[in-house]
Image (cartoon, helix red, strand yellow):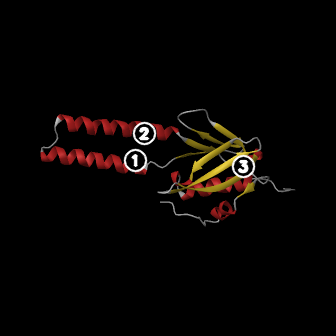
Amino acid sequence: MSGNKMLPIQRQEFTIRKWPLYFVVAVYILLLFILNNTGKLDEEKFLVISAGLAFLLLLYFLLTKNKLIIDNDEITQQLFFGKPKVLKWKEIKFSYLNWHFDGHTADLSWSFIDFSGKAINIQTSSYSRKKIKLIAEAVIEKCPQAFIDNRLKNITAGKFPWYIF
């Protein structure tokens, strides 16, 4: 990039979507309300529903700790379990989308791999289109040395190769 100055990227933290969890919690609360009003809520059912709600709250806590962070120098993946994975923008060799199909469902993951072989993999369905577009723009801007999947270049123009809710 002779003469072109790269724009600085402000630090941004992306957490995964939690709305599916909100939906399940709402169903649990509705079930609790219905069972209570019909008189069919005995102690055993209350304990099962309470245990389910406690599990969902724990899951919510774990999900809020998982983050993808981008800033001017690097991309970082923080997971609840394990140490953070950090890749410097200038050391990223590949960034591409990869379809996985297990016979029942398809999923699209996004891989970032540096010259030493370290990798960060994210599930695109875990983030909104707006967030995916911001990450793609950062990759295009900060990784001129990398092989970047053409689909990622299209994402920066708002052309997504899949449908994300």
Q: Is 84 placed above or below 105 here?
A: above
Q: Secondary structure at mark 2?
A: helix
Q: Which mark is residue 59?
A: 2
Distance in Å between CA atoms under marks 3 and 1: 35 Å
Is residue 11 in sight in this rendering? Answer: no
Amino acid at circle 2: Leu
Residue 95 x, y percent position in the rendering? 69, 53
- On the picture, is 74 further left or further right than 108? right
Residue 31 x, y percent position in the rendering? 24, 47
Furthest residue in direction left, as rendered: 39
Q: Say whether marks 3 and 1 touch (CB < 8 Å).
A: no
Q: Secondary structure at mark 3?
A: loop
Q: Is 105 placed above or below 88 here?
A: below
Tell me where residue 42 sits by quadrant: top left
Q: Is 6 placed above or below 13 here?
A: below
Furthest residue in direction right, as rendered: 2
Instruction: Tell me the residue that label 3 is attached to.
Output: 8
**Residue in the picture at 51% in, 47% down:** 16
Furthest residue in direction front, as rendered: 103
Amino acid at circle 1: Leu
Disc 3 or 1, which lies upstream in sequence? 3
Q: Nearer the viewer, mark 3 or mark 1?
A: 1
Q: Say whether marks 1 and 2 touch (CB < 8 Å).
A: yes
Q: Quadrant of the N terminus?
A: bottom right
Q: Which mark is residue 21?
A: 1
Q: Nearer the viewer, mark 2 or mark 3?
A: 2
Disc 1 or 2, which lies upstream in sequence? 1
- On the picture, is 120 further left or further right than 33? right
